[in-house]
Amino acid sequence: MPTVVITGGTGLIGKALSKALVDIGYEVIILSRKIPDAEDVFHKKTASESPGILSAPPRISYARWNIEEQTINKGAITKADYIVHLAGANVAAKRWTSQRKKEIIESRTRSSELLVKALSENSNHVKAVISASAIGWYGGIADMQSEDNGDTFTETDPAGDDFLGTTCQKWESSIEPVTTLGKRLVKLRTAIVLSNDGGAVKEFKKALRFGLAAILGTGKQVMSWIHIQDIVRLYIYAIENEKLHGVYNAAAPHPVSQKKFILQLARALRGRFFVPLYIPGFILKAVLGEMSIEVLKSANVSSKKINSTGFTFLYPSITGAIHKLAAS
């Protein structure tokens, strides 16, 4: 069975991807600084040829790495057929202080550097590295009035000069050296992931419990998004399709305005029993600081490149995606 090593395997995408890979026959090793309590999770240690790897049913193992100390379990690298690189501090978890910005960047760049070092210093048969990136690469367009606006971002557009644009540029550059080691590299610039288990949907649900549909700013800003099942399928597609290399936008074909998204979500979850609540931009700026830029700007991202490879989305429209979320 092929083995996939995953960094950031305990995050929203990582958990769903690990389960999906195991379901179709892959072995998974999750690199983690903190391995869960062995007595609660693990049923055995693996063979001596891979010391330090603890195995959890079914076919999911954990191996230690430490980004700050630049250490990694060599056994995980030598066992890997593929590496999926998802590691990175949650961009939305805390206010963007100078220290937090440093953590966001270094959690991505230093983890990439550790992988590059491990691959260059240890004998391995890794065929491909699939690395996360984000549509934050593109910056954004202010005051876009409609999701039908023809100005869309494609993979050839330069990085934005804001914080996330700079972060994504450093992030992608830090993993690029794996190509000099003969590894196929795919970078997926991921849009807002829609899932009941975390991310934007979980946050909007908090207000909807009280019957409030939170419309951010004017609500006209365009959201590019992707359903959790489609982003998982896209990672597996990138692993298995040897023709894929380079950068692809991981975004559904039909972006929507933030207002349309939240109203459809509210109707799906609350029927007619909700009240639209506009949250002015100045309040968002006061609460979120610089991060407010990200929820108020438009990012209309093209999916044409990944579509041209033959990948099809299960949920190309927001209506189908929200219906699935509401039914789950």
Image (cartoon, helix red, strand yellow):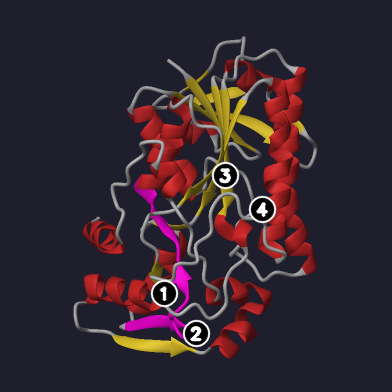
Question: Is residue 285 depicted above or below 189 in this figure?
Answer: below
Task: Write the residue at 61% across / 60% down.
Answer: 138
Precedes in sequence: disc 4 or disc 3: 3
Q: Position of residue 250 (x, y in %)?
A: 47, 49
Q: Position of residue 175 (x, y in %)?
A: 69, 37
Q: CA separation, marks 3 and 2? A: 29 Å
Disc 1 residue type (three-letter) = Gln
Task: Write the residue at 40% across / 64% down.
Answer: 255
Precedes in sequence: disc 2 or disc 1: 2
Q: Position of residue 154 (x, y in %)?
A: 53, 54
Label 4: few (<14), some (14–19) or many (≥20) C-alpha neighbours in 10 Å: many
Precedes in sequence: disc 4 or disc 1: 4
Disc 4 residue type (three-letter) = Cys
Q: Give the range drawn in magenta.
A: 212-229
Nearest the viewer among 67 and 238 is: 238
Visible residue check, residue 104: no
In the rendered image, the quadrant that contains the N terminus is top left
Say if mark 2 contacts mark 1, CB within 8 Å.
yes
- Disc 2 secondary structure class: loop
Looking at the rendered structure, which numbered label has been put on residue 258? 1
Nearest the viewer among 74 and 279 is: 279
Precedes in sequence: disc 3 or disc 2: 3
Residue 214 drawn in magenta = yes
Q: On the image, numbered disc 4 is attached to which residue? A: 168
Residue 206 drawn in magenta = no
Quarter of the view holding residue 322 = bottom left
Task: Write the residue at 41% across / 23% down.
Answer: 26
Looking at the rendered structure, which numbered label has been put on residue 132? 3
- Disc 1 secondary structure class: helix
